[in-house]
């Protein structure tokens, strides 16, 4: 603050010297110095007021934090300290009995050999059945003689073939006198087999003289007519 006053004073002196005025600044400077003395009281008031407020805030904060800490300590359950159990008193030593020599006792009587052996447990018989008298008299260690059983001959029954299949598989030697087989081209695949019947090249399933070709074999042709099946040999009439 004094530096500012000195600077102002010098500026004023320079200004007056330049103007050439003989005005005396001493009374004004002295009066200017006395004025700050009165104004210095105000900053001290504000500083003291701030210090008071700061102390009050710190005290309030301490009280608040102290109250919260006390509540937390009160809320925490107090764990009971483990009680140390006093060591149990040593049990009095029991005197060990001294074995005494046994008195001369009479020897035990021998067990009679005539004691009956235990009978084996037999299963209970069903109601209405009689016990065989001879089975009870058998000794438990004896082996029973079992009569050899005769083997039962197994009878094998053959199922008769159905009559319908027999009628289909039955070969009728007659009935093909009007059909002649003059050639056969036999193949493994049935759809490629061919035969010459009555001068016509036909395959399986063809109709010749009212008869249907059922199967073409290597040396004969099987035909069917009116439900009858017959074979016609190669280069000959059906027998």
Image: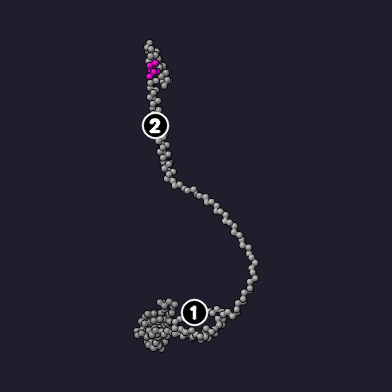
- Who's the residue at 49% across and 48% down the image? 81
- Who's the residue at 38% across and 26% down the image? 45
Reply above or below: 52 against 231. above
Callout 1 touching callout 2 (CB < 8 Å)? no
Residue 107 belongs to the span the image colors magenta? no
Which x, y percent locates residue 1?
41, 21
Which x, y percent locates residue 57?
40, 34
Q: Is residue 60 left or right of residue 92?
A: left
Taking depth in this image into account, of 163 and 96 the one nearest to the observer is 96
Residue 31 belongs to the span the image colors magenta? yes
What is the count of numbered marks?
Answer: 2
Residue 190 image-quadrant placement: bottom left
Residue 214 image-quadrant placement: bottom left
From the image, give the main secondary structure of the stretch colored magenta: helix
Q: Can residue 139 be seen from the camera position used here?
A: yes
Taking depth in this image into account, of 127 and 36 the one nearest to the observer is 127
Taking depth in this image into account, of 79 and 29 the one nearest to the observer is 79
> In which quadrant will I find the C terminus?
bottom left
Q: CA distance from mark 1 to mark 2?
A: 110 Å
Residue 227 image-quadrant placement: bottom left
Dot 1 corresponds to which residue?
A: 123
- Lower position in the chain sequence, tag 1 or tag 2: 2
- Who's the residue at 44% across and 82% down the image? 127
Number of the label disc, if any, that sits on residue 236: none
Reply above or below: 128 against 45. below
Dot 2 corresponds to which residue?
A: 53
Q: Where does the magenta region start and end?
A: 30-35
Which x, y percent locates residue 94?
59, 59
């Amino acid at each position: 603050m004094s530096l500012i006053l000195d600077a102002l004073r010098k500026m004023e002196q320079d200004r007056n010297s330049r103007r050439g005025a003989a005005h005396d600044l001493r009374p004004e400077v002295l009066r200017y110095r006395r004025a700050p003395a009165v104004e210095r009281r105000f900053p001290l008031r504000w500083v003291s007021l701030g210090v008071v407020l700061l102390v009050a805030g710190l005290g309030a904060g301490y009280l608040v934090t102290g109250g919260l800490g006390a509540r937390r300590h009160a809320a925490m359950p107090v764990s009971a300290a483990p009680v140390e159990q006093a060591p149990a008193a040593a049990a009095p030593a029991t005197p060990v009995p001294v074995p005494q020599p046994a008195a001369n006792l009479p020897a035990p009587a021998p067990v009679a050999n005539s004691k009956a052996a235990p009978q084996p447990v037999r299963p209970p018989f069903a109601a209405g059945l009689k016990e065989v008298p001879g089975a009870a008299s058998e000794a438990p260690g004896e082996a029973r003689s079992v009569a050899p059983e005769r083997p039962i001959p197994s009878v094998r029954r053959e199922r008769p073939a159905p009559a319908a299949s027999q009628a289909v598989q039955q070969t009728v030697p007659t009935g093909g006198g009007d059909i002649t087989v003059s050639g056969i081209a036999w193949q493994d695949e049935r759809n490629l087999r061919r035969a010459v019947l009555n001068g016509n090249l036909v395959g399986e399933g063809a109709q010749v003289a009212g008869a249907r070709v059922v199967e073409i074999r290597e040396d004969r042709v099987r035909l069917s007519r009116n439900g009858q099946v017959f074979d016609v040999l190669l280069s000959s009439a059906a027998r």
